[in-house]
């Protein structure tokens, strides 16, 4: 009788409190019935009980790993849990669940789920002291804007990556922020620093000239490191979990700061790599970094400190080219 009632509720699209109660009873009476756990998960999902829904789906998939409905619901649980309203955006950073969501959802769904929180971070940065110095420097060069980060300025880097760079910075040394998931990058982390997008890809109409421009900036960056700023960057990276990144790889964790800076200075094929980055990485598996990532106030402060440390290097690099 309970089973018939549960099936009828599902047929009618009714996953309310009565359906939830019936399926809870069934899960006790027939714990080996995968359909019961799948329906129960849907009931919990519609009640906004995401942890309970995830637990029911885990049980359904233990019974039948090929349960396509349960797999689909699992994705929906992650999407809705990540997208639920944040009561205090200024206080809520990025949780382990957010990184899990980033790596398991399709890129477009991950953007929908995490985009609002990522945008809240970007807009909070506009009020920071170093950001205002960057705006002033770009303004003196005649290419400034009132804000460093605008709404809807974050991008998908494919599976497991959301990133943003300062407004107008496609062909410049970019102040760049990115979120990486261990799937597929093998690291849950936030990237903060200076990047050079040397690839010709994208929809920019000035791709050829732009690629030449950013290659010139990278040469100036190398010159700055080869003379004045080598020691500064090595010391800062050693104190700040600094790593470089290049090509389509994750952070170069095998390179010590001095080796990493020497690699940057000696790089002779930046166009072939397409991407070169140097900066701080907040790793989720580090307790202090995890706390910083989880609280927006601390994360904004960490990004401000990173930008401040790298600002002199960026300024030495940033000489607008014709």
Image (cartoon, helix red, strand yellow):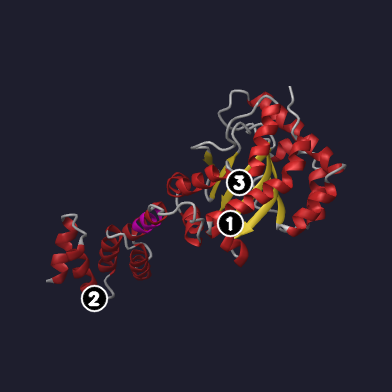
As helix, strand or loop, the secondary structure at mark 1 comes to: helix
Q: Left or right of 45: which side holds 301?
A: right
Q: Secondary structure at mark 2?
A: loop
Percent x, y for residue 204?
Answer: 58, 27
Q: Residue 133, how many percent across, how many down?
A: 68, 38
Identify the residue position indicated by label 3 in the image: 177
Distance, label 3 to label 1, CA atoms, is 15 Å
Q: Can you name the residue that lies furthest to the left here?
A: 1
In the rendered image, which residue does mark 1 sit on? 298
Going 49% across and 58% down the picture, which residue do you hit?
A: 100
Say whether disc 2 or disc 3 marks the residue closer to the N-terminus: 2
Residue 200 in percent (x, y) is at 64, 31
Q: In the rendered view, tell whether residue 6 sits above or below residue 119.
A: below
Sequence-wise first label, 3 or 1: 3
Which residues fall within the magenta stretch? Answer: 73-79
Cα gap from disc 2 to disc 1, whole angstroms: 48 Å
Residue 30: numbered disc = 2
């Amino acid at each position: 009788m309970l089973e018939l009632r549960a099936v009828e509720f599902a047929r009618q699209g009714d996953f309310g409190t009565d359906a939830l109660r019936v399926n809870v009873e069934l899960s006790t009476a027939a714990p080996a019935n995968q359909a019961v756990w799948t329906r129960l998960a849907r009931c919990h999902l519609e009640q906004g009980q995401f942890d309970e829904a995830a637990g029911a789906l885990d049980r359904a998939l233990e019974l039948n790993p090929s349960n396509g409905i349960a797999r689909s619901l699992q994705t929906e649980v992650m999407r809705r849990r990540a997208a639920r309203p944040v009561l205090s955006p200024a206080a809520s950073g990025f949780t382990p669940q957010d990184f899990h969501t980033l790596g398991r959802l399709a890129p477009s769904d991950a953007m929908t789920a995490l985009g609002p929180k990522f945008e809240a971070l970007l807009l909070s940065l506009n009020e920071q002291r170093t950001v205002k110095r960057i705006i002033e420097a770009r303004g003196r060069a005649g290419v400034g804007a009132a804000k460093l980060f605008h709404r809807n300025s974050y991008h998908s880097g494919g599976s497991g990556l959301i990133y943003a760079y300062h407004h107008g910075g496609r062909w410049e040394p970019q102040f760049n922020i990115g979120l990486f998931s261990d799937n597929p990058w093998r690291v849950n982390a936030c990237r903060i620093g200076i990047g050079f997008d040397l690839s010709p890809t994208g929809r920019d109409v000035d791709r050829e000239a732009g690629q030449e421009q950013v290659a010139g900036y990278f040469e100036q960056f190398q010159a700055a490191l080869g003379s004045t700023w080598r020691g500064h960057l090595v010391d800062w990276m050693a104190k700040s979990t600094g790593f470089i990144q290049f090509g389509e790889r994750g952070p170069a964790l095998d390179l010590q700061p001095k080796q990493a800076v020497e690699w940057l200075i000696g790089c002779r094929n930046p166009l072939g790599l397409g991407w070169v980055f140097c900066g701080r990485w907040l790793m989720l598996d580090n307790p202090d970094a995890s706390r910083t990532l989880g609280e927006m106030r601390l994360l904004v402060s960490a990004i401000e400190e990173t930008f401040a440390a790298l600002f002199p290097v960026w300024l030495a690099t940033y000489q607008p080219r014709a």
